[in-house]
Image (cartoon, rainbow, N blue to C red):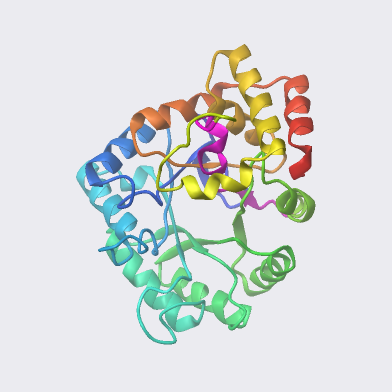
Amino acid sequence: MQHVPLGTSGLTVSQLCLGTMQFGWTADEPQSFAVLDAFVAAGGNFIDTADVYSRWVRGNVGGDSERIIGRWMAARGNRDQLVVATKCRAQMWPGPEGEGLSRNHIVKACDFSLKRLGVDCIDLYQFHSFDENVPVEESIGAVSELVTAGKVRLLGVSNYPPERFEEIVTAGDEMGVPIVSLQPHHNLVHRKEFEDSLQDFCVKRGIGVIPYSPLAKGFLTGKYRKGGPKVQSARSNGVREYLTDAGWEALAAVTEIAAVHETTCAAVALAWQLAQSGITSPIVGANSPEQLADQLPATELTLTPEELAKLNAASATFA
């Protein structure tokens, strides 16, 4: 797997980023270790998590994914070979400052993440979503303190609406804490918001783009088939929005091209995304090394202009 610049941040990251929301949820610790080992063996160095992963699971308290990653890095002794990204914003403890992007929450949440990960510094600290209740200058100021203290290297954001994203990028530049990355929702069947309002801005400003859900919650892997048996999984309910004529048309194009290349649907969907302007590293997830193996060929797959055009046309409803 090749490594590429994350925008103009100075970081060099693998073409695929390993998402870890499933750690402590649909993947237990041994399974998570196996996925992490397989990712690194394939040349991956970019790992994304969040403090809230996976607080929604009964019996979990949040920070579960970070703790697993921290124990894995300690066991492997490979921290210095990795780019570790995490996020803050979600509710992690009771009280008015238990969530959000206030200075007090950010500073406290960062310290907790550092402890769970077992690291001295977070390479990429990200605001998980916009907080309308806190001035952007307060949030960036908190990260500036963390950078000065050596606890955070760089700042990125996730799930920001276009107008708020431009606002925080401008504020970050003015305050000397540039926004180096954006984590948007983007894939073949969810294109419009990023492509209409964010893509050109990121390219122009040299901001790295690490899209989440590149396989549309598993829909673009091909495991869902029109008229086929219902798929039961922890995330299957989230796929319903794609089970439409337009969704099946996009999946049919992916399936056809995968057959031509003798590869997986997942690899084709990811290769399409990697070919889009401004995209740095799609965030892939897996519960097992086998699931990860279905996605890794994307980095070696070059789609022809005709194939890219076919995929664009088949997914035009979502653009």
- Residue at the bottom extreme? 96
Residue 75 visible in image? yes
Q: Name the foreground residue: 188 vs 224.
A: 224
Residue 6 in view here? no
Q: Nearer the viewer, residue 86 or 61?
A: 61
Q: Residue 12 location in percent, x, y? A: 52, 43
Task: Residue 1: say if magenta.
Answer: no
Q: Residue furthest left?
A: 75
Q: Position of residue 231 (x, y in %)?
A: 45, 37
Does the magenta run of residues contain 219?
Answer: yes
Give the image location of residue 308, x and y in percent.
73, 26
Where 57 falls versus 319 (above or below)?
Answer: below
Task: Find the magenta span and give its range.
Answer: 205-224
Is residue 99 rendered to the left or right of residue 34? Answer: right
Q: Position of residue 64 (x, y in %)?
A: 30, 58
Q: For the point 61% across and 55% down, which residue is it?
A: 182
Task: Give me the residue at 65% from left, 19% from top.
Answer: 257
Q: Residue at x 50, y 77 (%)?
A: 100
How many marks are shown on the rendered structure? Answer: 0
- Residue 225 in the figure: left or right of residue 168: left
